[in-house]
Structures are given as structure tokens and as C-alpha cells.
């Protein structure tokens, strides 16, 4: 009798161990358990930790509550300004209602993926190319709203949507590069045009200061010569100031007047009047066909308003 009781106890204990082993479940911290008893949803969601179900009657489905990172495949579309682009994005979402994610949708991951692709193509068609390139934050918010609206019914919340890359055709890239280059050139010309009046004012101020102090012009000339000579050039350009040429012209006029006065005193007024050339300027043609002023001495006619001499200071 005792042996039968012991055998019965061992049998019950073994059955209990088998039952507990079949009914025992462990739900991880980042998961929630949804129980379906005979196909009917139980309202209570199993919390993380150890839990028991009825073997053969209950079915436990674990739902991950972590944020899921899902890349959206690149979608090709035509923007509102008729430009063909390829855009890819990434969606961050998480499950907030485990029971809704199990009951209302067969596979919430696949459903969110297809919804994200459809919404991305819709955003491409409603936007312009400039918005896709420079105003992505606004497009991300609009894309997030488009995906989040139907996903809420599935117990899923969209945490964030980011457009990763916008691929353009090579012809469009070259056109945009030419446009950017033309815009930079336009701004450079505007800046140069604005700099011309400022530079002219500064040059005018410098000219007035040099007029008050003529020695400043000579010092500036010497500085220019030193700057040119420091670059080891074989040819040195020496500009001659116009004031020096004017001084020579005045000296020539004084010499001519003195010679005329001496001749007048030795020959007489009447003879001097006959020998002096007329006061009116006469234009004679030289052998090359150019006209020269005969009323001024030849030396003064050859003096230019600006003279520049080139001196070779080294081997060519």
C-alpha cells in the first residue's frame, strides 16, 4: 500500500513538473506577452518576467517594444518641377499597443515598410527639387505625419523619419554646377563694381596728398622699383613722372625765348619780324602721313605726356 502511494506521488510530481515546464514562459524586459486562449484575445498583457499559460489552450506571442530602425528602399519619382530623382529614407518606429499590433495587422513591420515607400513616392511628387535638397526638415515632418496617421491604428508610433540621400541624373548635376558657377561669377562682378568707386575715392585722396607733397611721388616711385626688383625679373620698367617732362618743356621754352630776344636785339625789330615764323599753328605732313605742329620747337613736340623706359638688367 505504501509503495502504491509513493508511486502515485512520484507520478503526480512528474506530471506537475511536466505541466510547469510546458506552461512556463519568460518574457524579456523589452518585450510584452499577448495571450490568445482558444483563439480569443486575453485582455491582460503579460509583463516582463516569469509567467504561466495553459498548455495546449493558450498561445503566447511576444511583441518587441524597442525602437525599430527600418531602411526604406530608394524610390524613383518625378518632382513637381519635372526632375527625375531617386530618394531613400529611414524610419524609426516602436510598438505602443501590443494587442493592436497582434490583432489588427498580420505583420506590422511589413505594413510599415510598404506604407513608408508609398508615402515617400507621394512626397517626391508633391515637392520640388530645391525642397528635396535644402528643406529636408519640413519634408521629414510631412513624411512622418503621412506614415503615422494609419500606423496608429496598428498600435505603432512613428518616432522619426529621415531622408537619407537624393540621387540626381548626371545631366542635372552638370546643369546645377553651371548655375552655381554663373551665380558666383555674377556676385564677383557685383563686388568688383562696388569696389571701383571705393578705390577711385582712395586714389583721389592719395593724389591730393601727393600734390601737396611732391616728394611723396618720388618715394612711391622708389618703392615700386624696389618691389619690382625683388622678384628677380630680367626687365625693369621705370616710369618717368610727367612733372619732370613739364619742367624740361618749360626750360626749353625759356631757352627759345632768350634766343629770340638776342636775335631781335642784334638784327633789329623789322628783320626779326620777318624772320620769326607766324604765330598761327601750322600742320605739316611728315613722310609717314601724320601731321605735326610747326609752331612749337621740335624737341617739345616729341615730349609725350607719359614716358616709360624699359631697362634690361639681366640675361634674357
Image (spheres, grey):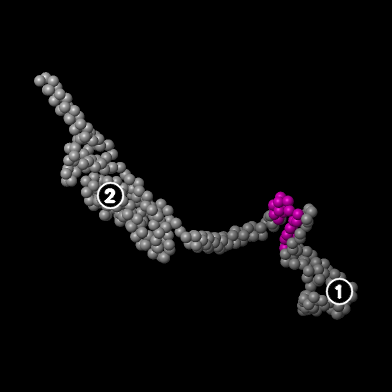
| Res. 107 mark | 2
Secondary-structure class at tag 2 = loop
Residue 295 is at least partly visible in this image: no
What residue range appears in magenta?
221-242
Q: Residue farthest to the left? A: 1
Nearer to the camera, 195 or 18? 18
Nearer to the camera, 305 or 109? 109
Q: Is residue 88 left or right of residue 158?
A: right
Q: Residue farthest to the top? A: 2
The location of residue 70, given as percent across then percent down, is 35, 48
Q: Is residue 271 magenta?
A: no
The location of residue 59, given as percent across then percent down, is 21, 41
Circle 1 residue: 264
Q: Quadrant of residue 143?
A: bottom left
**Disc 1 to disc 2, C-alpha distance:** 125 Å
Question: Which residue is located at x 84 percent, y 78 percent?
Answer: 273
Q: Is residue 181 left or right of residue 287?
A: left
The location of residue 17, given as percent across then percent down, is 20, 29
Going from N to C along the chain, the mark reached first, 1 or 2, is: 2
> Disc 1 vs disc 2: which is toward the camera?
2
Amino acid at each position: 500500500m505504501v509503495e502504491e502511494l509513493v508511486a502515485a506521488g512520484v507520478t503526480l510530481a512528474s506530471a506537475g513538473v511536466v505541466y510547469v515546464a510546458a506552461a512556463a514562459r519568460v518574457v524579456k524586459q523589452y518585450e510584452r506577452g499577448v495571450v490568445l486562449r482558444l483563439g480569443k484575445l486575453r485582455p491582460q498583457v503579460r509583463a516582463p518576467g516569469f509567467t504561466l499559460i495553459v498548455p495546449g489552450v493558450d498561445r503566447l506571442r511576444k511583441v518587441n517594444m524597442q525602437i525599430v530602425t527600418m531602411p526604406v528602399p530608394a524610390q524613383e519619382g518625378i518632382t513637381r518641377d519635372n526632375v527625375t530623382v531617386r530618394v531613400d529614407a529611414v524610419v524609426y518606429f516602436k510598438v505602443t499597443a501590443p494587442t493592436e499590433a497582434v490583432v489588427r495587422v498580420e505583420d506590422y513591420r511589413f505594413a510599415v515598410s510598404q506604407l513608408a515607400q508609398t508615402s515617400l513616392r507621394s512626397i517626391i511628387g508633391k515637392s520640388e527639387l530645391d525642397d528635396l535638397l535644402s528643406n529636408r526638415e519640413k519634408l521629414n515632418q510631412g513624411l512622418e505625419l503621412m506614415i503615422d496617421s494609419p500606423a496608429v491604428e496598428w498600435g505603432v508610433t512613428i518616432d522619426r523619419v529621415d531622408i537619407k540621400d537624393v540621387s540626381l541624373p548626371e545631366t542635372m548635376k552638370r546643369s546645377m554646377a553651371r548655375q552655381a558657377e554663373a551665380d558666383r561669377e555674377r556676385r564677383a562682378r557685383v563686388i568688383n563694381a562696388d569696389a571701383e568707386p571705393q578705390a577711385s575715392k582712395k586714389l583721389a585722396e592719395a593724389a591730393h596728398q601727393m600734390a601737396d607733397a611732391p616728394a611723396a611721388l618720388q618715394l612711391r616711385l622708389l618703392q615700386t622699383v624696389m618691389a619690382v626688383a625683388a622678384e628677380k625679373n630680367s626687365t625693369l620698367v621705370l616710369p618717368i613722372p610727367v612733372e619732370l617732362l613739364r619742367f624740361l618743356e618749360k626750360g626749353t621754352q625759356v631757352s627759345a625765348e632768350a634766343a629770340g630776344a638776342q636775335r631781335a636785339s642784334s638784327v633789329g625789330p623789322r628783320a626779326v619780324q620777318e624772320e620769326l615764323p607766324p604765330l598761327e599753328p601750322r600742320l605739316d605732313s611728315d613722310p609717314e602721313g601724320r601731321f605735326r605742329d610747326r609752331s612749337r620747337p621740335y624737341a617739345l613736340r616729341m615730349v609725350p605726356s607719359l614716358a616709360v623706359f624699359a631697362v634690361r638688367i639681366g640675361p634674357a
